Image (tube, helix red, strand yellow):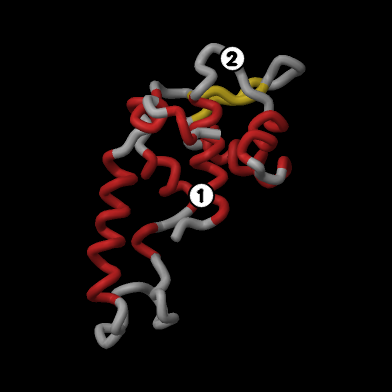
Amino acid sequence: MLSQTVEYALRATLYIARYPDRSVRVQDVATAVQAPRNYLAKILGALARAGILSSIRGPAGGFRLALDPDRVALSDVVALFDRTDQRRCLLGHGLCGENPSCTAHARWAPIARSMDGFFDTTTLADLLSSPRNLP
């Protein structure tokens, strides 16, 4: 239920966080997370402007995590690209929760809250501690 942009942003941020002692080039991140380079460059730029990443220019440049991984909740990354308060209704009735007669809302709302809770309480460090499935 995440946008492609959010998926790329999360995967890229996790990939970069795996290399705390060096800057990672956009091309290397794009290859690792299987994202289009130019599109990913814009995503990484937004993450840098938000203070989650830092960017270094030049031949040895690239991106690094600007904060400790335990200080970056997944929701910090998600919030830059997707507004969870603006979720669309699964059945096409505008924004989720706007149509009280929506048959999916009562069942979907607890799942959406659970997802929000996961992103709020899970940090990059949490996911880095189990590297089996990371890019």
Quarter location, residue 43: top right
In the rendering, at what x and y percent does residue 29 appear?
64, 32
Residue 55: mark in rendering: none
User: Alpha-carbon distance for marks 2 and 1?
Assistant: 24 Å
Quarter location, residue 127: top left
Residue at the image position 42 percent from the left and 23 percent from the top: 67
Find numbered disc 2 in the image and state the secondary structure of the residue it sits on: loop
Q: Is residue 104 left or right of residue 83?
A: left
Going from N to C along the chain, the mark reached first, 2 or 1, is 1
In the rendering, at what x and y percent does residue 53 appear?
52, 29
Marks 2/1 in contact by CB < 8 Å: the verdict is no
Three-letter amino acid code at the position of disc 1: Val
Q: Which residue is mark 2?
A: 22
Q: Is residue 115 above or below residue 104?
A: above
Q: Which residue is mark 1?
A: 6
Q: Nearer the viewer, residue 103 or 48?
A: 103
Residue at the image position 54 percent from the left and 12 percent from the top: 21
Which quadrant would the N terminus be assigned to in this image? bottom left
Other residues around mark 2 within 10 Å, as few (<14) / some (14–19) / many (≥20): some
Q: Nearer the viewer, residue 34 or 80?
A: 34
In the rendering, at what x and y percent does residue 126 appear?
34, 30
Residue at the image position 23 percent from the left and 75 percent from the top: 106
Q: Is residue 80 left or right of residue 57?
A: left
Instruction: Give the farthest residue toward the top.
Output: 21
Find numbered disc 1 in the image and state the secondary structure of the residue it sits on: helix
Three-letter amino acid code at the position of disc 2: Arg
